[in-house]
Image: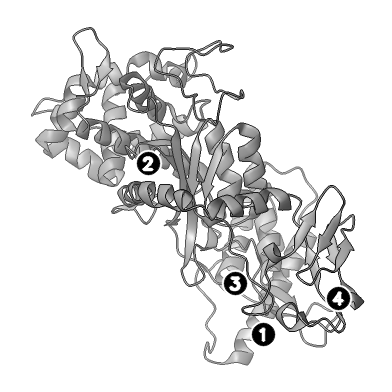
């Protein structure tokens, strides 16, 4: 990697690639473009901090050679990298370094004829500590005092539960459950009074965010105290967890994550599309780790839409206006998409079918109501007639809300003990894409389906391992900054993978593989 950047960094990262970051009125770079871009690639590849990257640039001969510095040259200040990342993240093309490497991949033809893509995701720990309710409320009140004009006076007049000029937790008997409950009640009451007495004024973005965050953390973890109707100002810690709970006021976008039933993490979710034969990452996205809009299936189809078409490099298909333009005709599936059951939702299958992809996705497991009893596939569904027939031959209609209610028809049924435990009979809830899911489960029963999945899955796991090696904890706060890091990490890994496959520059100037 060091030798490659030493020879080709100017070809990869020309000045024109970053000219919009330094347009008229926005200054110009004080450090050569190709030097900063090379450092960003090496930094994410080796997972070092800004300060460590600059130290390597100053004292490590490999970094000096890669970035074009003389032995006696010193590196730049670490804040230069922060400055560049901020401009990149705020630009119209934040993934331009990743796009450069993708262009190299396309020119080499490494993905030519590769019609499979694998979807996967992994949880990355956030860069901050998870805060409890008490810490969050105190931090949110202090932030309002800093950001909102006139708020400090309101807090001084209305706060009774804590001295918010102090950053630490109150001094109480933390082993006393009653003392903790009284503190929570006092802090939530403070937050409500502060919000109710803030001056009526137009707030800028930072002030509005601070007020909104205080309102959120003061309500997400509490409920009315026992015997309270919620109007007398008495509160306690809720006996449940908010589904989209903010876990830190330092990084409000980080979330609790459950990758599996037994594995819980706090942070963000990195989504990848990988070509399973080469291990090359073709698309990435980083999202908060929780929420329906950030699920594997919801993000997966969006990433596939970023994929170019299946033409050879530099060629076009009939009806295309540019090489590599996405193909949605009827000539065949665009991609054979491999993924685990997290991507097997009805919405995902419908989106893949509409886009012309062929899913090789482990279907969602069917769990019968009675252990060892009948599952959903044991019922026959006739969508055209709007009827559902149970294993005993009893038929009922599908309601407008997609329910099939057997009710009293189950009385006396000899198969009832294998079907339901409800005294009112069996009720089915049919998914809007139930027919599509049934057809997919039928295809998944084919041994060839499982053989394809088992053959191509290992490289995807290897790509995830490459991505997370030494980088399980993120270095930045917020989705945008970490998404930029993920794109740089993918670019560095792809470049390293291409070098392993024999990447070189031909005499004619084209990129090629050995």
| Callout 4–callout 1 Cβ contact below 8 Å | no
Q: Can residue 113 be seen by looking at this rendering?
A: yes
Which residue is rendered at x = 47% and y = 65% of the image? 265
Residue 124 quadrant: bottom left
Spatial distance from mark 2 to mark 4, Cα to Cα?
Answer: 58 Å
Instruction: From the image, tell me which residue sits under label 3.
Output: 133
What residue is disc 2 on? 276
Neighbour tally class for label 1: few under 14, some 14-19, many 20 plus, Cα within 10 Å? some
Q: Give the quarter of the figure containing the N terminus.
A: top left
Check the image and tell me how it is coloured.
Answer: one colour
On the image, the x and y values in percent for residue 156 come to: 67, 66
Tally of numbered discs: 4
Q: CA distance from mark 3 to mark 1?
A: 13 Å
Looking at the image, can residue 32 be seen?
no
C-alpha separation, residue under disc 4 versus residue under disc 1? 17 Å
Q: Are marks 3 and 2 in contact (CB under 8 Å)?
A: no
- The 10 Å Cα crowd at callout 4, few under 14, some 14 to 19, many 20 or more, is few
Circle 4 sits in a helix, a strand or a loop, which is it?
A: loop
Return the residue found at the far top: 508
Residue 12 located left or right of residue 232: left
Q: Position of residue 461 (x, y in %)?
A: 36, 52
Residue 234 in which image quadrant? bottom right
Viewer-side residue, 448 vs 180: 448
Residue tagged 4: 231
Left or right for 111, reference 364: left
């Amino acid at each position: 990697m060091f030798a490659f950047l030493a020879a080709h960094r100017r070809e990869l990262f020309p000045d024109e690639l970053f000219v919009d970051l330094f347009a008229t009125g926005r200054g110009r770079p004080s450090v050569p473009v190709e030097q900063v871009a090379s450092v960003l690639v090496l930094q994410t590849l080796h997972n070092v901090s800004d300060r460590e990257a600059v130290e390597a640039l100053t004292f490590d001969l490999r970094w000096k050679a890669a970035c074009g510095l003389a032995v006696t040259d010193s590196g730049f200040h670490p804040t230069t990298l922060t400055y560049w990342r901020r401009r990149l993240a705020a630009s119209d093309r934040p993934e331009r370094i990743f796009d450069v490497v993708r262009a190299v991949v396309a020119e080499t033809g490494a993905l030519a004829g590769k019609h499979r893509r694998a979807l996967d995701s992994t949880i990355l720990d956030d860069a901050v500590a998870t805060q409890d309710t008490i810490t969050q409320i105190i931090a949110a009140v202090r932030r309002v005092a800093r950001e909102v004009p006139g708020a400090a006076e309101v807090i001084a007049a209305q706060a009774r539960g804590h001295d918010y000029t102090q950053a630490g937790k109150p001094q109480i008997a933390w082993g006393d459950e009653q003392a903790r409950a009284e503190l929570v009640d006092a802090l939530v009451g403070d937050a409500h009074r502060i919000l109710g007495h803030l001056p009526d004024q137009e707030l800028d973005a930072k002030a509005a965010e601070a007020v909104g965050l205080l309102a959120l953390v003061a309500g997400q973890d509490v409920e009315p105290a026992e015997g309270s109707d919620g109007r007398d100002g008495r509160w306690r810690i809720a006996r449940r967890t908010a589904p989209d709970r903010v876990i830190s006021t330092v990084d409000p976008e980080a979330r609790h994550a459950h990758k599996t039933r037994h594995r819980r993490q706090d942070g963000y979710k990195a989504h990848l599309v990988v070509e399973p034969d080469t291990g090359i990452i073709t698309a990435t996205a980083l999202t908060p780790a929780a929420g329906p809009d950030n699920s594997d299936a919801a993000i997966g189809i969006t990433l596939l839409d970023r994929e170019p078409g299946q033409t050879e490099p530099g060629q076009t298909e009939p009806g295309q206006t540019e090489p590599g333009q996405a193909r949605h005709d009827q000539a065949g599936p665009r991609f054979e998409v491999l993924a685990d059951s997290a991507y097997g939702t009805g919405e995902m299958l419908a989106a893949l079918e509409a886009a012309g992809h062929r899913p090789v996705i482990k279907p969602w497991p069917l769990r019968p109501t009675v252990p060892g009893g009948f599952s959903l596939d044991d019922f026959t569904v006739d969508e055209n007639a709007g009827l559902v027939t149970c294993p005993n031959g009893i038929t009922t209609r599908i309601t407008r809300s997609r329910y099939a209610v057997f009710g009293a028809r189950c009385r006396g049924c000899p198969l009832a003990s294998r079907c339901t435990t409800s005294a009112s009979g069996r009720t089915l809830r049919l998914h809007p894409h139930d027919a599509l899911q049934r057809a997919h489960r039928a295809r998944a029963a084919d041994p060839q389906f499982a053989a394809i999945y088992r053959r191509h899955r290992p490289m995807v796991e290897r790509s995830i391992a490459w991505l997370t090696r030494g980088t399980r904890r993120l270095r930045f706060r917020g989705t945008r900054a970490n998404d930029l890091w993920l794109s740089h990490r993918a670019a560095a890994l792809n470049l390293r993978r291409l070098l392993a496959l024999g990447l070189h520059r031909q005499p004619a100037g084209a990129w090629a593989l050995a």
